[in-house]
Amino acid sequence: MTTHPSLAAIAEYAGGGRGLDEATVWSIEVHLEDCAECRARLAGSAAADTLALLDRVSAGLDREIAAGPAPARRTRRWLAPRRRWLVAALLPWVTMTVAVLLCALGLNRLLPELPSLVLLLAPVAPLPGVAAAWSRRLDPAGELIASTPAAGLTMLLRRTLVVLAVIVPALALLGTGTRTSLALMLLPCLAFTAGTIALGALIGVPRAAVGLGTLWALAVVVPTVITEDLPVVLRPGSAVLWALTAVVLVGVAMSRAGDFRRLTSHR
Ligand SMILES: [Zn+2]
């Protein structure tokens, strides 16, 4: 457990935290989640008029609850974790991606002279789902995430994992039908996911996903389809480079965690 924040800092936090910098507010918030002692100190450090207001609100709520209809039945417990892991907005994007990959496999059957289209699309396959996971517009829980950055970031990273948990096995499965190496199928996919989150810290994840996807399409997919020749970046020798790139980009994405606190990434 980290050291407890000072009483002065807790009092400042209770008063709205205007005198504290963002990092301090963040660390107090995270600490309070785990420390009952400091939660008690926070409750004790509220100003007298705040306590009086809370009393009035609490008495009012008690009256209205007593007068109101019986409470709705609790949501079944198995539904709750699903909501945290898989927002309904992700499903259409992930399903669409898998459908596109299936079409790519079908096209390859029709045009066997083309290099594997699944291999060509693999690096950008998770991007629609990742963009949807981080898009405030598509997310019914967006307001909640903005108000609790600690829980919000975890939720968004979990959803990125959900996207990968669907896309990675799909790619592995579709790849077995072709003669492409699994490493070249999955490493660029991981590198692009980490790259999107790293770049997204600066310009917003959905924008980063569109930018990197477009870049890949113009620089690699279109020339490959025209020349019918597998690009250098997807030839067997480049797997090591992709592994290194993926490791570096995951590192960069993790080191940018501070930027995600402000959630400029979540536009
Ligand atoms: Zn404490």
Image (tube, rainbow, N blue to C red):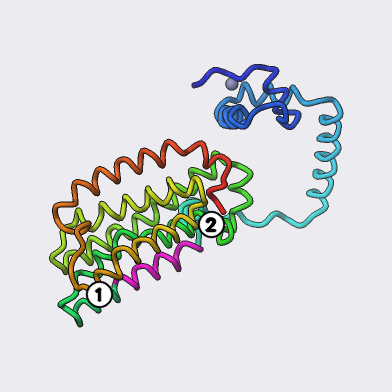
Which range is magenta?
89-101
* Residue 235 rendering spot, x and y as whole percentages: 16, 58
Q: Name the residue under label 2.
A: 135
Callout 1 secondary element:
helix
Q: In this rendered view, identify the residue nearer to me: 107 or 145.
A: 107
CA gap between label 1 and label 2 equals: 34 Å
106 vs 19, left or right, is: left
160 vs 265, left or right, is: left
* Residue 224 rendering spot, x and y as whole percentages: 24, 69
> What residue is drawn where x is 51% and y is 63%?
89
How would you classify the magenta stretch by its main secondary structure?
A: helix
Sequence-first disc among 1 and 2 = 2
> What residue is drawn where x is 78% and y is 49%?
65
Give the residue type at disc 2: Ser
**In the image, is residue 92 part of the stretch drawn in magenta?**
yes
Q: In this rendered view, identify the residue nearer to me: 81 or 192.
A: 192
Callout 2 secondary element:
loop
> What residue is drawn where x is 80% and y is 49%?
66
Q: Name the residue under label 1.
A: 226
252 vs 171, left or right, is: right
* Residue 12 rendering spot, x and y as whole percentages: 72, 24
Check residue 242 in the rendering and tell me which mark sits there, or answer none: none
Query: How many discs mark residues in the rendered view?
Result: 2
Query: What is the quadrant of residue 162 in the picture?
Result: bottom left
Q: In which quarter of the image is ligand 1?
A: top right
**In the image, is residue 210 part of the stretch drawn in magenta?**
no
Q: In this rendered view, identify the residue nearer to me: 165 or 267.
A: 267
* Residue 99 rendering spot, x and y as whole percentages: 34, 73
Compared with 140, 114 (above or below) is below
